[in-house]
Image: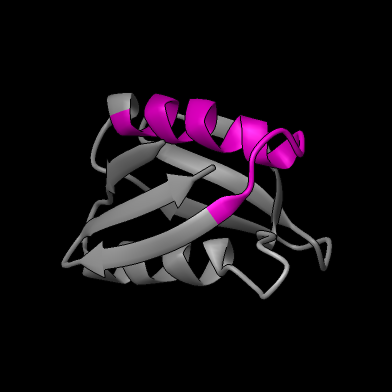
Amino acid sequence: MKISITCDDEYEAQKLMSFIFIKEDKETYITGILNVIKNEMIISLKDKSAHSILLKDEENVEKFADFIQSVLDKEHNLVSTKKIKSIIEIVKE
């Protein structure tokens, strides 16, 4: 399954890419979504820190949250990510 997420700008896209980072065992650094405020998403990472990501709009936040939840629940694995300007393409299996 493939999804394209549009971030607020290229900086936010790079930040989200670094949090999604796929290691050899196909895991993500993201452990959960703590809060959503309009187009802003607060995520928690494995190191127990929390970070804010600004996406283009509320639709992209909802799309990403739905997509990543099955990965967080260990139902799917991330396969690849690619950044094109402010858009991130994520593939899961």
In the picture, measured across the screen, residue 28 lies left or right of residue 52, that is right
Q: Is residue 39 above or below residue 87?
A: above
81 and 9: which one is in front? 81
Is residue 34 something that shows in the picture? no
Residue 53 sits inside the magenta stretch: no
Total marks shown come to 0
Quarter of the image with the C terminus is top right
What is the image's colouring? Answer: one colour
Q: Is residue 72 magenta?
A: yes
* Horizontal and vertical percent position of residue 30: 67, 54
Residue 92: x and y, percent?
50, 45
* Residue 38 vertical position relative to residue 55 in the rendered view, above or below: above
**Magenta span of residues:** 60-78
Considering only vertical position in the picture, is 86 above or below 3?
below
Q: Residue furthest front?
A: 93
The residue at the point 31 percent across, 53 percent down is 89
The residue positioned 58% from the left and 68% from the top of the image is 22
Asked if residue 51 shows in the view, the reply is yes
Relative image position of residue 76 (x, y in whole percent): 64, 39
Instruction: Indicate the quadrant containing the N terminus: top left, top right, bottom left or bottom right.
Output: top left
Dominant secondary structure, magenta: helix
Residue at 30% in and 56% down: 88
Judge left or right: residue 62 versus residue 85.
right
| Residue drawn at x 28%, y 51% as measured from the top left | 7
